[in-house]
Amino acid sequence: MTPVVLALVAGAVVGLALGALGGGGSVLTVPALIYLLGFDTAQATTASLVVVASTSATALFAHARAGAVRWRLGALFAAAGALPAVAAGLLSRRVPDAVLTGAFAVVAVVAAVLVLRGRSPGTGPVRPARAAGAGAGVGALTGFLGVGGGFLTVPALVGVLAVPVRSAVGTSLLVITVNAVAAFGSRLGSLAAVDWALVAPFAATALLGAWDGRRLAARVSTALLRRVFASALVAVAGVMAVDALLVHSG
């Protein structure tokens, strides 16, 4: 396949993941840009923020129409993570690619465990301090790893704040959009190095896939969503870990 065709196919998969799972876009986008399209880690993490921010905003609209977004909780979560996302984004410029890749793999595994564990939905209001703390942590990792944070936000909403999975999926899209935009602001100096001729078709099919992903989420069980999400995270973590150990460190 040509690079443009690969970009189109990979973008569609990312869009489906974001629309159906409320996350997974960045954790799939970054490896796709690196291993399929030849980006280095710094370029991939910068480009992924553009793809994920635009796709998440599109998917958010679809979930909001279905009433699956907790706006107050999402706003608190996102607001707490905005500044940490910017600060961590600036810090990541000083970190070697091997460290970023390895950290990406570790966080993906932790997120997979949280997704599989789940938690029974809470019956009372969510404590603002807990929500803000979780949001700040996700924001920092968003900026540092160049991810939208959905693959961390969904587990945090479900496993830490006891939000039902379907509401967590919709709410995470609000958090992803805000965090990705904030983190992207700290990477403006690296825009010239990104091949936007490949990022554009990637983002275009991701936007289209997000709409189909929302319809897919309405047709499958919560348990299946968890298993698919966790399996994707573990698979990507394995590839990234091997790359960090054998390629970057070599």
Image: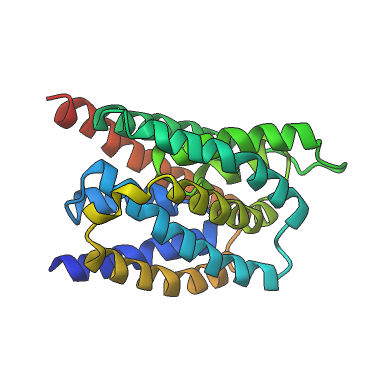
- Residue 91, by quadrant, is top left
Q: Is residue 226 placed above or below 85 in the rendered structure?
A: below
Instruction: Specify how the rendered protein is coloured.
Output: rainbow
Q: Position of residue 232 (x, y in %)?
A: 40, 47
Residue at image x 49%, y 40%? 86
Front residue of 234 and 40:
40
- Residue 81, by quadrant, is top right
In the rendered structure, the answer to whether residue 126 lies left or right of residue 116 reads right
Residue that protrudes farthest toward the front in the picture: 189
Front residue of 29 and 196:
196
In the rendered structure, the answer to whether residue 38 lies left or right of residue 63 reads left
Q: Position of residue 48 (x, y in %)?
A: 37, 53
In the rendered structure, the answer to whether residue 95 lies left or right of residue 4 reads right
In which quadrant of the rendered image does the C terminus lie? top left
In which quadrant of the rendered image does the N terminus lie? bottom left
Q: Position of residue 228 (x, y in %)?
A: 47, 51
Front residue of 141 and 64:
141
Q: Is residue 122 visible?
A: yes
Q: Is residue 56 placed above or below 223 in the rendered structure?
A: below
In the rendered structure, the answer to whether residue 235 lies left or right of residue 212 reads left
Q: Is residue 74 placed above or below 122 in the rendered structure?
A: below
Residue at image x 50%, y 54%? 181
